Image: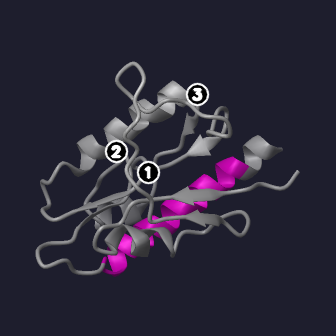
């Protein structure tokens, strides 16, 4: 069974777009970004729609202007949506040196872009590649 990947992201300055591109996917991804931020809600979160990732692996990465600009809480908020959808969350965790080198966020790759915005550096891109490879591995295992 082949695995399919949909990459959905919002990138106001291009940093998240750059984090998405170096990731290793199990197949050619369908790109759906940049997207508008969803405004609909149900029970305090985004509603589940047909085709959402129920029983499918998902992961999240983020960029903000400042190092302490809510990066971890943003990923945790996204995870609440993923729980609601019944998705399988695949964080990088503390499972590779790339996570430590890029700042040590176990929830997902994070990039403090600054102001004006700067592109992700090599350590952040290496972490994004690791996170994408980890997602690809779990996607392949679950597609099984």
Identify residue for label 1. Answer: 60
Identify residue for label 2. Answer: 75
Answer with left or right where residue 92 lies relative to residue 6. left
Pointer 1 and pointer 2: residues touching (CB < 8 Å)? Answer: yes
Q: Under tag 2, what secondary structure?
A: helix
Residue at left 16%, top 65%?
65
Identify residue for label 3. Answer: 86
Mark before the other along the chain sequence, 1 or 2: 1
Alpha carbons under labels 2 and 3: distance apart: 16 Å
Residue 8 picture location, percent across and down: 51, 57
Residue at left 42%, top 36%?
79
Q: Under tag 3, what secondary structure?
A: loop
Alpha carbons under labels 3 and 1: distance apart: 15 Å
Residue 4 picture location, percent across and down: 73, 56
Front-most of residues 91 and 34: 34
Tell me where the magenta segment starts and ends, as one range: 120-139
Number of marks present in the image shown? 3
| Mark 3 surroundings within 10 Å by alpha-carbon count, few (fewer than 14), some (14 through 19), many (20 or more) | some
Task: Give the overall secondary structure of the magenta segment.
Answer: helix
Q: Is residue 48 above or below residue 63?
A: above
| Mark 2 surroundings within 10 Å by alpha-carbon count, few (fewer than 14), some (14 through 19), many (20 or more) | many
Q: Is residue 143 above or below residue 98?
A: above
Q: How is the image coloured?
A: one colour
Residue at left 12%, top 62%?
66
Q: Under tag 1, what secondary structure?
A: loop
Mark before the other along the chain sequence, 2 or 3: 2
Answer with left or right where residue 45 lies relative to residue 138. left
């Amino acid at each position: 069974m082949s695995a399919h990947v949909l990459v959905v992201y919002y990138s106001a300055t291009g940093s998240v777009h750059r984090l998405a591109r170096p990731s290793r996917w199990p197949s050619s991804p369908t790109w759906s970004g940049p997207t508008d931020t969803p405004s609909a809600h149900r029970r305090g979160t985004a509603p589940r729609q047909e085709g959402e990732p129920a029983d499918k692996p998902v992961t999240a990465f983020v960029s903000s202007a400042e190092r302490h600009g809510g990066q971890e809480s943003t990923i945790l908020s996204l995870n609440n949506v993923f729980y609601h959808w019944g998705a399988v969350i695949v964080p990088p965790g503390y499972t590779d040196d790339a996570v430590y080198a890029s700042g040590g966020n176990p929830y997902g790759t994070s990039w403090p872009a600054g102001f004006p915005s700067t592109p992700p550096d090599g350590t952040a891109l290496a972490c994004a590649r690791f996170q994408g490879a980890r997602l690809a591995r779990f996607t392949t295992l679950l597609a099984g």
